[in-house]
Amino acid sequence: MQTPERTLHVNGVDLAVQAFGDPAAPAVLLVSGAEATMDWWDEGFVARLADGGRYVVRYDTRDTGRSTTWPVGAPAYTQADLVGDAVGVLDALGIGAAHIVGISMGGGLAQRLGVGFPGRVATLTLISTSPGGPGGPEHPGLPPMSEALAKVFTEPGPAPDWTDRAAVVDYFLAAERAFAGTIPVDEDRLRRTAGRAFDRSPVPAAAGNHWLIEDGPPVRDRLGSITAPTLVLHGTADPLFPYGHAEALAREIPGARLVPLVGMGHQMPPPEVWDTAVAEILAHTDGPQGRRTRSLRGGGCG
C-alpha cells in the first residue's frame, strides 16, 4: 500500500513525506544523500522492501523537493538539524524506533543517529558512505577518491539554467555518470527520476545548499558506542568513497556486517543489485530488533 504524499511540520519546517506498506509492520526510514529528493529512492526498490513486510518511509530533506527551502547559497541550518529532522519525522508518525537506512550524506546522518539517538534506532544500514570523508591527508587510512572524480570536483562544468527542466535533468545525468561504477548507467530510468525530482522542486537549485552546511563535530571516534545492529552495503566500484571506507565502518562499528554490491559506484542502488541489497536489508531488519514500536505520544500525522 502506498500512501499519498503528505507534509509534516517538524522542528519549525515542513517536510514532504511518503510511506509504503502496512503501518503496523516494522518501520524503515530512508535517509537521502546530498541534493537528493526522496524520488531517488526508486519506487521499485521501495516496493520490494514494503512487499517484504516493512513500513517504508521516505522524505524530502530540507532544501529538496517540496520541503522547506532556504535562499540559494544561504542555508540557515546545520547537519545536526538534518539529524533532528529524521527524529522529528519518526515523532510525527508515532514511531518510537525505526530501522534507519542512510545513503551517502544520509549514511553520515544515520551514523549520528546511531551515536546520539540510540533509542530511536532499531538497526542501521549504511550505504555508500564513510566514517570520515574522502580520504587523503585529512583522513589518513581512508583511500582517496578516484583521480577521474577528483578532476570533476576541481574542474566542474557550468551550472545549468535551473529553470530549464531538460538542462537540469542533463546536469544530474552527468553527475550520475561521474559517480557510477562498472554497472552501465540506465539513462532512461535516471532521466525519469531526475525529471520527477525537478517537477516536485519549486527551487531546484536550493538542493546545492547541502554542500554549504556545517557538519558539526565528527563522530568517528564515537562509532564504537553504536549499539544498533549495523549492516554496511557498499559498491565495489565507488569512486568517491572507495571500498576501504566501508571496511573501516565495518571495523569501527561493533558487530557491523559488510556486504559488497558488485560493480556499484557512488549511487542509489541500481536494479542490478536489488536482489542482494533488498534481501540483505530485509534479513537485517527481521527478528526481535525488527518489531516496530510507537512513541508514547501517539501517531499523529500532519
Image (cartoon, rainbow, N blue to C red):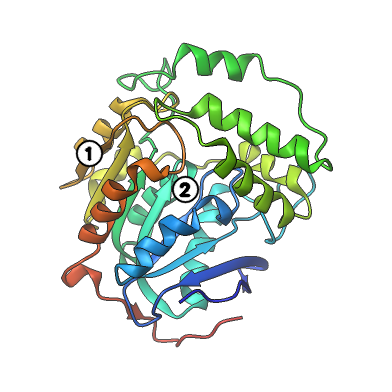
Image x and y of residue 256, in percent = 20, 46
In the depicted structure, whether residue 52 falls above or below residue 24: above
Q: How many marks?
A: 2
Image x and y of residue 86, in percent = 49, 62
User: Where, by quadrant of the figure, is residue 65 drawn?
Assistant: bottom right
Q: Quadrant of the N terminus?
A: bottom left
In the depicted structure, whether residue 260 falls above or below residue 142: below
Can the viewer see residue 233?
yes
Marks 2 and 1 close (CB-CB < 8 Å) = no
Image x and y of residue 77, in percent = 65, 51
Residue beneath the point at 36% across and 61% down: 48
Which one is in front, 119 or 157? 157
Point out which mark residue 109 bears.
Answer: none
Helix, strand or loop under label 2: helix
User: Where, by quadrant of the figure, is residue 159 drawn?
Assistant: top right
Helix, strand or loop under label 1: helix
Residue position for label 1: 250
Residue beneath the point at 20% across and 36% down: 251
Q: Residues within 10 Å of mark 1 (few under 14, many from 20)?
A: many
Residue position for label 2: 106
For marks 2 and 1 on the same chain, the one whose residue lies earlier in the sequence: 2
Q: CA distance from mark 2 to mark 1?
A: 17 Å
Residue beneath the point at 34% across and 48% down: 274
Q: Amino acid at mark 1?
A: Ala
Q: Quadrant of the C terminus?
A: bottom right
Which one is in front, 47 or 101? 47
